Image (cartoon, helix red, strand yellow):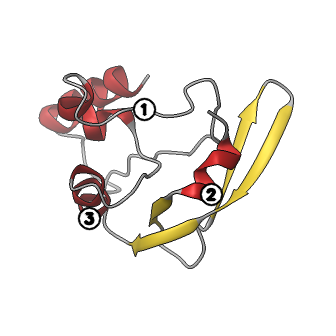
Amino acid sequence: MTPADLNQHEAIVYSQRSGGEEWLFRRGTSETLVPLQSRLALTAAEGVRAGVITGQGFAISSRWQFAPELEPGEVVSLLGEWNLPSTDLWVIYPSGRLTSTKASAFVKWFEQIIT
């Protein structure tokens, strides 16, 4: 029901660096920092996905990563009224080269599904 309730469950933490054991939730002007009990700390998104699907815990993830499981209810979204800090996403092209038509089409498609 609230971010504080997450302390009663085990988290799957995705982190490329050390940390990730505290999550910041926002709703309106309110902010809540939640320290977590992590069952798993992983550096691969595929591992986070597998952990959630096999019932090892909950995780922060992009909706598209679990789209096939969200639709039939195999995975559920929690705390929908709360927001998380935004994350930058970058597309990097090699310098001095023209962008291929396939790469441009992929970037346009990806922008549509994440916005």
Of discs 2 and 3, which sits in the foreground? 2
Q: Nearer the viewer, residue 100 or 77?
A: 77
- Amino acid type shown at disc 2: Asn
Q: Is residue 85 left or right of residue 92?
A: right
Q: Which residue is mark 1?
A: 77
Q: Residues within 10 Å of mark 2 (few under 14, many from 20)?
A: few
Q: Is residue 21 left or right of residue 52?
A: right
Furthest toward the front, the residue is: 8
**SS for tag 3?**
helix
Is 77 rendered above or below residue 99?
Answer: above
- Amino acid type shown at disc 1: Ser
Residue 47 — which label? 3
Task: Tell which circle, 1 or 3, labels the residue nearer the N-terminal end.
Answer: 3
- Check whether the beta carbons of the residues at disc 1 and disc 3 lie within 8 A of each other: no
Q: Residues within 10 Å of mark 1 (few under 14, many from 20)?
A: few
Residue 2 — which label? none
- Quarter placement of the N terminus: top right
Q: CA distance from mark 1 to mark 3?
A: 18 Å
Q: Which residue is mark 2?
A: 7
- Quarter placement of the C terminus: top left
Q: CA distance from mark 2 to mark 3?
A: 22 Å
Task: Tell which circle, 1 or 2, labels the residue nearer the N-terminal end.
Answer: 2
- Amino acid type shown at disc 3: Gly
